[in-house]
Amino acid sequence: MMTLLEELDACGGWRDALAGERQRLAGLEAWLAEEERQYQVLPERGLRLNALRRTPLEDVRVVITGQDPYPGLEGSVPHAMGLSFSVPEGIKPPRSLNNIYKELADDCGLMPPSHGDLSTWAEQGVLMLNSTLTLRQGEPASHAKQGWEAFTASALACVNRGSAPVVFLAWGKHSHKLAADIDEGRHAVIRTSHPSPLGARKAGADFDAFIGSRCFSRANRFLREKGRGEIDWCRL
């Protein structure tokens, strides 16, 4: 079973960029080992840095941030797979993801798929990173304020410092806070409400409602203008 440091070592350019976080990861590893003596911790080992492994730092074109992994199981299969908002094939898409598909249908013509696996986005340079990367099964936010937030803030800072323009899709107030320090002179931040059923249609003074935001085509327009191509959001 892979340790967090072994996972980081498998993450290409992130390994060197986050070298200063190795001590923090070692501390998290020790803490998680104690948690695993009493609880089922999600996602499973080998998937906890999956977002970094699947989307190399040098390939990042879009960032989608979330709060923490899905806490549920379907049978014995965890919903959490280390990519924010994504679930493995065979798992019914959660309601937030269904709203993402609805907006994609209106914005880009997506024919909603029967699964919720967004791995093909990761392969195209979409970094799907939660701010807390583990939790106890069935207990949302149970691993908050244990060190993950500082680690993932460092990862976002690496993207922010990069010379290549990136789009940050900030869905919901938690993601708005994560994007607060992004250099909008070089990067784009598209702020909307969260795609959950409770907030998807609610706009605020400084952000659009998620439904109707056309955030996906707006992201592609920015990438195209900056010479970074487009994301094929409908390739799922």
Image (tube, grey):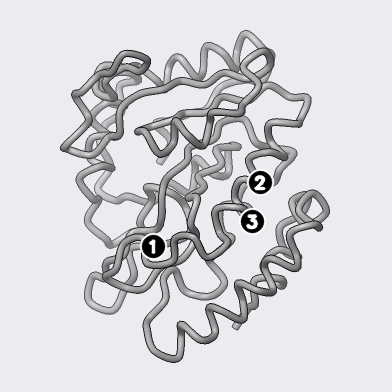
Above or below 18: residue 41:
below
Secondary structure under tag 1 reads loop
Q: Nearer the viewer, residue 117 or 27?
A: 27
Kindly identify the residue that appears in the image at 49 percent across and 60 percent down: 145
The residue that label 1 is drawn on is 80
Give whichever of discs 2 and 1 has the lower sequence position.
Answer: 1
Kindly identify the residue that appears in the image at 40 percent across and 41 percent down: 236
Kindly identify the residue that appears in the image at 71 percent across and 71 percent down: 5
Give whichever of discs 3 and 1 has the lower sequence position.
Answer: 3
Q: Nearer the viewer, residue 231 or 185?
A: 185
The residue that label 2 is drawn on is 155
Secondary structure under tag 2 reads helix
Image position of 201 (left or right of 82): left
Give whichever of discs 2 and 3 has the lower sequence position.
Answer: 3
Give residue 218's position: percent from left, percent from top.
Answer: 45, 14
What label does residue 168 carry, if any?
none
Res. 25 image quadrant: bottom right
Spot the residue most to the top: 225
| Kind of residue indicated by mark 1 | Ala
The residue that label 3 is drawn on is 53
Give residue 4's position: percent from left, percent from top.
Answer: 64, 71
Above or below 121: residue 17:
below
Above or below 122: residue 15:
below
| Kind of residue indicated by mark 3 | Arg
Give residue 18's position: percent from left, percent from top.
Answer: 76, 53
Q: CA distance from mark 3 to mark 1?
A: 15 Å
Kindly identify the residue that appears in the image at 65 percent across and 36 percent down: 60
Within 10 angstroms of label 2, few (less than 14), some, or many (20 or more) residues? some
